[in-house]
Image (cartoon, grey):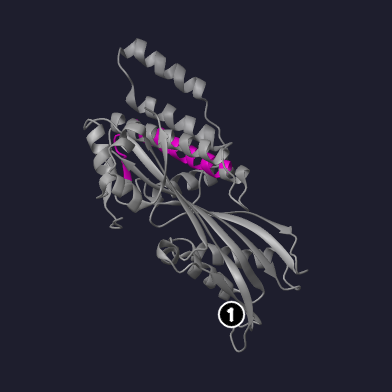
Amino acid sequence: MPTADTSTIISGQRNLKKYIACVQQEIDVWDAFFRSRKFDWMSNKQLESWLDSFRISINALEGNYVFDSGLSLDIVANSSGFPKNYHIDEVAEQWKSLQISGYNKSITKLKKAFIDQIFSARRINSPLLEEISKAYVEKTLSVSEPMHLYRFNFIEPCNAPNGRKAFLCEWSQYTIQSILVTYTMLFESADDWEADDVNMKILSQVLRNETDMLTKLDELAADIDFSNAKIFPKWIGRIIVGPLFISHLTQDKHELQDALNAMADKDEHVCASRIIYEYVLSREESSVMSIKDPNGVEHEFMQKFAVRSDGEYRERGVTYFEKFLFAPHLVMQLLDGEYRKEIGHQLIGTGE
């Protein structure tokens, strides 16, 4: 699929509401899908929390922008369909500010003033309506955490069959390409490595830097392995949510986008989306000499990762992957059989 970073500006109350409704609809589809599946080491509870944080961000963008004529939503129209990552960061920064200052507005008073204006001036006070909408966003963000561009979610010890110390950790990224990705890693460690504040700060920074863009999974695993001589990645899995395809709005050049456009009038949105689940695992560990990590610590062992040599496995650098396409049943009927075979997705019908 094309990767050029093209943008579509969404402005106006009606257009914004239509777009937000489309995204919310797909979040419901993904949530139902995750609840029905189990993905190896990945936690369903974490997946649910991850999607909830995205829903909070999307709802906050609607509340902040819908009545503000000076603001518009910038979405990545090619190979994403989601808001540009600086929009997600804006909401995260708003949340951080509220954790410090607290929420101190009275929506009841604002609504009373709005109604009084209607009766006294016989007109809608648009600035006050905007203030009420943004106050609701602040109230929500004061108690609910939105999505962050990067978030390290947890680390916990687990058992390793060889007697080594082992840990399971999870983090997520809203990538530079504006795609949602969550990662889980199972790794073993040297006896003197502890998940203390210093080591966790170093590890988290490495994970953030290595996954801010989508790269081949085996290359990512090798980079993480090289980054710390005391950490031995054994399994890294990720779930990629996106792109989101929307009729007459996204600009991807393929049969699915054409089918969406054919199904919908110019002023309505019909949408489809994709999820990829994939992982890479270490097939063996070999002794090495004279290789130092970026902190100058000499490696004793390096991992060799198991990547199948055929087709897309090699292109993605993975041991295993599954691709899922979510689209309305009528849209699927428009897809040519050869196209379905070519993209290699499991098709899951949605809606009518």
How many marks overall?
1
Residue found 48% across the figure and 44% down from its top: 94
Q: Quadrant of residue 350?
A: top left
Query: Where is residue 22 shown, x and y percent of the image?
Result: 37, 34
Query: Where is residue 163 shown, x and y percent of the image?
Result: 78, 68
Which residue lies most toward the front here? 337
Quick check: 189 left or right of 135?
A: right
Give whichever of 25, 193 is nearer the camera. Answer: 25
Query: Where is residue 278 shown, x and y percent of the image?
Result: 51, 56
Q: Which residues are magenta?
A: 48-74
Q: Quadrant of the C terminus?
A: top left
Quick check: 186 left or right of 126?
A: right
Query: Where is residue 65 shown, x and y percent of the image?
Result: 36, 36
Residue found 26% across the figure and 49% down from its top: 254
Give whichever of 7, 111 is nearer the camera. Answer: 7
Residue found 38% across the figure and 31% down from its top: 21
Which residue lies most toward the bottom here? 290
Residue found 52% across the figure and 30% down from its top: 105
Q: Give the answer, above or below, for where 153 lies relative to 94.
A: below
Q: Quadrant of the N terminus?
A: bottom left
Which residue lies most toward the right here? 163
Does 14 appear in magenta? no
Q: Is residue 76 visible?
A: no
Quick check: 300 left or right of 251?
A: right
Q: Amino acid at mark 1?
A: Asp
Asked which secondary structure carries label 1, the reply is loop
Which residue lies most toward the top here? 119
Q: Is residue 88 visible?
A: yes
Q: Residue beneath label 1, please?
A: 293
Q: Quadrant of residue 130?
A: top left
Q: Quadrant of residue 351?
A: top left
Give the prevailing secondary structure in the magenta stretch: helix
